[in-house]
């Protein structure tokens, strides 16, 4: 029995951003492309990070005041008095790698769809970068691609019956 691989259903035209990009550039790309995350690549197209809208949201979110107690009195007080506008403006010229995850889970084209589906489900990821043997980005595999593949398998016989085959 042949196992279908990621390479047969992945998207080969994967969007990415450069490790040299600013967060302003990345935010614009996320919005313009209508995606929620991007692999970050170096000048050799090797995956060196992963940035998501969630990373940016965490950076601009309002933080609660925190006190750390060591005995009787607080030793540290963290007070968030910046507005969201101030936080956004302070991010715009920062490098993407300041917020990007540096440990990126990637897959290869030869991995089975079932194994990757398991990883996506367990990690609660929506997509994973697909790399070659040199760590270069060659595509992306999304949950939606695996669902489409499963849908085609589930309903293929139904379509054949409708056509009278």
Image (cartoon, rainbow, N blue to C red):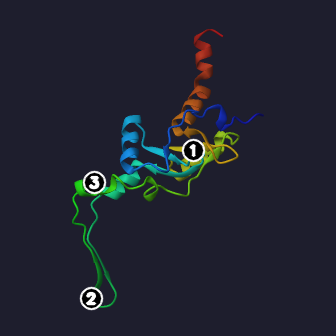
**What kind of element bears circle 2?**
loop
Residue on which disc 1 sits: 129
Contact, CB < 8 Å: mark 3 with mark 1? no
Residue on which disc 3 sits: 89
Q: Residues within 10 Å of mark 3 (few under 14, many from 20)?
A: few
Left or right of 43: which side holds 27? left
Q: CA distance from mark 3 to mark 1?
A: 30 Å
Between label 1 and label 2, give the one nearer the viewer. Answer: 1
Disc count in the image?
A: 3
Tell me which numbered mark, 1 or 2, is placed earlier along the sequence.
2
Q: CA distance from mark 1 to mark 2?
A: 48 Å
- Specify the quadrant of the image occupied by residue 165: top right
Please determine whether, in this image, residue 115 is positioned above or below residue 149: below
Q: Nearer the viewer, residue 133 or 52?
A: 133
Residue for point 41% across, 35% down: 33
Residue for point 39% across, 45% down: 25
Tell me which numbered mark, 2 or 3, is placed earlier along the sequence.
2
Residue at the farthest right position: 1
Q: Residues within 10 Å of mark 1 (few under 14, many from 20)?
A: many
Q: Position of residue 150 (x, y in %)?
A: 59, 32
Contact, CB < 8 Å: mark 2 with mark 3? no
Res 73 label: 2
Q: Position of residue 77 (x, y in %)?
A: 27, 78
Quarter containing the N terminus = top right
**What kind of element bears circle 1?**
strand
Please determine whether, in this image, residue 4 is positioned above or below residue 49: above
């Amino acid at each position: 029995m042949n196992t279908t691989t990621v390479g047969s259903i992945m998207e080969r035209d994967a969007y990415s951003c450069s490790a040299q990009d600013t967060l302003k550039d990345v935010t614009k790309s996320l919005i313009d492309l209508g995606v929620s995350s991007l692999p970050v690549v170096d000048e050799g197209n090797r995956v060196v990070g992963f940035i998501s809208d969630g990373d940016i949201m965490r950076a601009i979110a309002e933080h609660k005041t925190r006190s750390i107690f060591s005995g009787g009195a607080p030793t540290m007080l963290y007070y968030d008095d910046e507005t969201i506008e101030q936080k956004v403006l302070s991010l715009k010229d920062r490098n993407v790698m300041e917020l990007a995850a540096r440990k990126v889970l990637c897959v290869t084209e030869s991995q089975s769809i079932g194994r990757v589906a398991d990883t996506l489900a367990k990690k609660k990821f929506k997509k994973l970068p697909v790399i070659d043997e040199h760590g270069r980005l060659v595509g992306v595999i999304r949950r939606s691609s695996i669902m489409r593949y499963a849908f085609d398998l589930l309903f293929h016989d139904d379509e054949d019956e409708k056509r009278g085959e």
